[in-house]
């Protein structure tokens, strides 16, 4: 889980929970809840703050969260820039999922129109 990864990276960086809280601007209690897997769905904004404070990036935290077998997914510079821009503008994971679902719906509609259904 992502909390396990945050705790591991925090320890690897030699930071206490209080130090990470101060460095990231995320409350110590919330970080504690994340590390104990009581909070399992942090916003992209919080993940970005935590990742930066741990000298990593958000894609590293997310890749490790999924534990996907197979090749590691790496974002190119343009995708990374777009992702960080969306996060800085307040896009949440839920917004992203809704947008993705909308795109699938539009593609489905176009397929039906082409087939004349």
Image: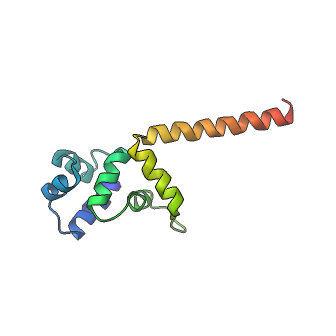
Where is the N terminus found, in terms of image quarters?
A: bottom left
Look at 50% across and 62% down and name the residue there: 77
Q: Is residue 65 above or below residue 33?
A: below
14 left or right of 85 in image:
left
The quadrant in which the C terminus is found is top right
Residue positioned 85% across, 36% down in the render:
115
Q: In this view, does 93 lie above or below 117?
A: below
Q: How far from the left and from the top, in percent, is residue 103?
A: 63, 39
Q: Say whether residue 17 is left or right of residue 50.
A: left
**In front here: 35 or 13?**
13
Query: Residue at position x 68%, y 35% from top?
Result: 106
Q: Position of residue 12 (x, y in %)?
A: 24, 70
Q: Position of residue 79 (x, y in %)?
A: 52, 56
What colouring does the structure picture have?
A: rainbow
Would you say 23 lies left or right of 81 here?
A: left
Outermost top residue: 117
Number of numbered markers: 0
Q: Where is residue 100 in the image (x, y as percent from the top left)?
A: 57, 41
| Picture quadrant of residue 38 | top left
Residue at 54% across, 69% down: 71
């Amino acid at each position: 889980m992502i909390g396990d990864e945050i705790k591991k990276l925090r320890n690897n960086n030699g930071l206490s929970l209080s130090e990470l809280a101060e460095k990231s601007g995320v409350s110590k209690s919330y970080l504690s809840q994340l590390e104990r897997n009581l909070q399992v769905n942090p916003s992209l904004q919080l993940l970005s703050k935590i990742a930066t404070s741990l000298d990593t990036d958000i894609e590293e935290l997310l890749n490790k969260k999924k534990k996907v077998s197979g090749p590691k997914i790496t974002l190119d510079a343009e995708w990374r820039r777009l992702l960080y821009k969306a996060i800085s503008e307040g896009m949440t994971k839920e917004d992203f999922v809704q947008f993705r679902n909308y795109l699938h719906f539009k593609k489905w509609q176009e397929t039906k129109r082409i087939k004349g259904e």
